[in-house]
Amino acid sequence: VAADAVGVAANSSVIPQLLGGGASTLASFAESEGASAIVASFPIPELPSAGEPFQTQPNHRFEQWTLSAMIQNEGTGEWQWIEQQFFRIAIAPESGKENLSAWGFRDVMAQRYTTYNFSSEQGQSSSSAERRAMQLSDVTEDSVFVNDNVAWITSNGCSSSISLDRMDTTMLWTARECPTRRQLGNTIISAADTDFVKGVGWLFHAYGQIPTAAGAVMIDQLEVRLPDKTKLRVNRSRRRSGTGPVTVAASLLSNGKTHSLRDVQWVEQFDGDALFPTGIRIEAPSLPLVLDVEMPSTLPTELLGTGFGIQHGVLITIENIVMPGIISLQPRIQEAS
Amino acid sequence: VSRLCLLSLCVVLCACQDKTSTSSTTEDSAQNKASQSTQWLATTGVVPAYEQRAGNADKGRFALLNESYVNCGVPERVFRELQNSVADERPVVGVSGRDSSMDGLPYSVNRVIGRTGTPVVSSNCLTCHGTELFGELIIGLGNEFADFTQDASIIVERAGALVRGVDETAEWELFADRIAAIAPYTRMHTVGVNPANNLTFALISHRDANTNAWLAEPNLPSPPTDPPPVSVPPWWRMVKKNALFNLSEGRGDHARFMLAASMLCADSVDELNFIDQYAPDVRAYLSSLTPPEYPFEIDLELAKHGRPIFEANCAECHGSYGLDGQYPNKVVPIEVVNTDAKLMEIATDEVGQRYAEWFNASWYGELSEVAPAKGYVAPPLDGIWATAPYLHNGSVPNIQLLLNSGQRPTLWRHVATDANDPETYDTINVGWKYEPISIGSITGSSQVDNKRERISDLNDNRVYDTRREGYTMSGHTFGDGLSKAERQAVIEYLKTL
């Protein structure tokens, strides 16, 4: 396994628990997926401290790391999409930390993990928020190692970008992305098998101000792998004032490239006065493609202090295939009384 | 940040594009008008000279790089925050002769004071009319790599997420509202070309002709949502040309035309009059510019051989060069040049006439006049090596193909993403390198399994598809009769201009 690989055999007793889902695993997926919990872990490679753009940004209170990868089981040839995300909001200044992690444990607010097998058309998603939700309340900080090099690939060949400079990201905060796909190879240990997989993936690192703390505009975002394994990302912007245009941008990410789509529509359904929709339809006529997004029956997993909710594993129907996606929503703008 | 530059800059480009000047005597432009229903149009043929207001070139350069002729934009704090985030990997290229308040800002933007007193950053003319060519900023060289393929409104709306406070929000909302109004009419299919003409029409439709006030709803028909593409011409042509723009529609006082750059933000005649005070200086500066010399080796013997061939085949329209050079200032009829007619058709149809009537009845028309001809100006060819791709719509990648119409690619992809790498410049054919694309790869299967490839090609904004309306590479067949050796000799000569 190469040093820059993702997901080596477990060398941390904690991370598998993180990924096991636990209390906040979405009920809908628990039902559809059964009990085949995936156990993956991340390496703590013997690498020098990660430089830009993957180094933790202590001057920014908000930070998000996302690894998106397509991997193939060498034995069966089956393709699988894996999306792993860590989300951090700095609550208090860090001090006196001696381990290699620049992330304060107290700052790791959420982790999410989604996988989808294209052959079996089955997906799974787990989502954990806050220390208690992560089932780590009984561990000490010293025993937790959220390494800077989690999912670390390389900084070579990567470029820096900001959201406003890329239609495909539209993240509100400073974002640094490795557009060059990296070859991945590793062992995935599931409840049933230990398989060797290989594939490609990229790392996305976003950081900056807490995007919803102020600002004149709110952003909603949806991501899903299409049946042809292309990733579709849809973003919507709304002015907090309720005036002005609601804009929708969508892009396909494939083969290390991004392609913007025109004229994408985003339509929502609400249940009464709920702040978050119960259903969303995305129409991309240039493909053409229609996505029906069914939100989980559980209450929106609003992240404390941020004002918005992120959910991995929302059910998305594409051409009669039901698969998990990821959606980040800000609450509905209340009409002025 | 670069996208934020592009959107307001595209406002600038419509006005700054292909501005020309002359110090010749005034003639009655009406003499050049046809009669009957096309009375408002100019005739093809020689364009008369128009008297220009005198200006100071040094003051004009300062004004261009410092003044508030586009006085709305993104709050400076937001702009700098975004810029600083990427400064380590995208060094800022500045320009000399600016106020210290603009330290650290790229050459393509000006810092100005908004209506609330909050400093904002707006694009200046150089976003389109400046290019880093092999590492050196060339003021006046059209940016043939600018990307107008995205929805400008989406970009600006997202900038709002970083806006804080009442004043910043007010500045941003004003700017965002204006961009939202014009965005549907300014999105191109491929990088490198821009929507200058369409943008001007969209802005006119939102302006009151008498007061120059911004109208939330347009009071004229909207331009097409698929803008005809325009390749950005270099400013150094100004010293020779009598009329502005591809159709010679910019007649009369050129400095006044340039103030169309202020149509996005300036909301009163008083504001325009203030800006107009230094507009002649800017015109004088633009007229003082000269093209960069060809930086690669030239076969001077071959170039010498090419000169008489050029003069026999090209000079009648494009002029002659050297100390005794003459530029004829000709508009070539569309039926003769036969290049893509879309740009001309839109400007000269009934809707185009309404835009022209608006302009001529407005403050702008006090000193200048819109009068397009049904043809295209044959431009002077000084520094032509640096201005690829060619034709008014940028549809032909290099001069070799410009002179051999049968070899032009139907589909081609830009290789370079900017003008800095000499390795991406084709010194044989003279132009930026490109990749021809087979038509089959674009129009492939619609099966789901092939969707990724199909989608990728269809959405590749680096591909120039000459089958699109307005994007065709037809016409200008005047070099087809040359032998290969003659053509190569002409190309070598053109490198010396």
Image (cartoon, helix red, strand yellow):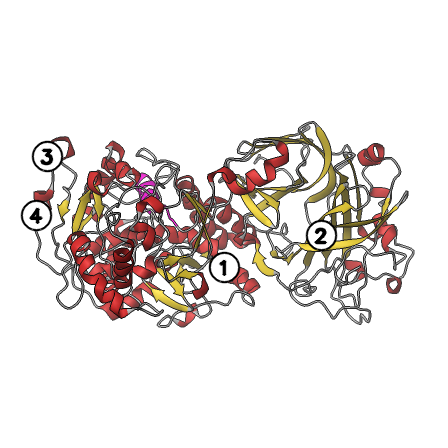
Task: Tell me residue B171's x, y (percent).
Answer: 45, 52
Where is the C terminus of chain B found, in terms of image quarters?
bottom left
Separation of marks 4 and 1 at Cα, in angstroms: 47 Å
Separation of marks 1 and 3 at Cα, in angstroms: 51 Å
In the image, the segment drawn in magenta is B193-207
SS for dot 2: strand
In depth, the one of A301 and A76 nearer the eye is A76
Separation of marks 3 and 4 at Cα, in angstroms: 15 Å
Q: Amino acid at mark 1?
A: Phe
Q: Chain of mark 2?
A: A
Say if the magenta span includes residue A10.
Answer: no
Identify the mark at residue B35; answer none if there is no mark.
Answer: 3
Q: Chain of mark 3?
A: B
Residue corresponding to mark 2: A67
Residue corresponding to mark 4: B28
Separation of marks 1 and 2 at Cα, in angstroms: 28 Å
Q: Nearer the viewer, mark 3 or mark 4?
A: 3
Among the two numbered marks 1 and 3 on one chain, the one whose residue lies closer to the N terminus: 3
Q: Amino acid at mark 2?
A: Leu
SS for dot 1: helix
Q: Nearer the viewer, mark 1 or mark 3?
A: 3
Among the two numbered marks 4 and 1 on one chain, the one whose residue lies closer to the N terminus: 4
Among the two numbered marks 3 and 4 on one chain, the one whose residue lies closer to the N terminus: 4
Q: Is residue B82 left or right of residue B367?
A: right
Task: Tell me residue B75's x, y (percent).
Answer: 47, 57
Q: Residues within 10 Å of mark 2 (few under 14, many from 20)?
A: many
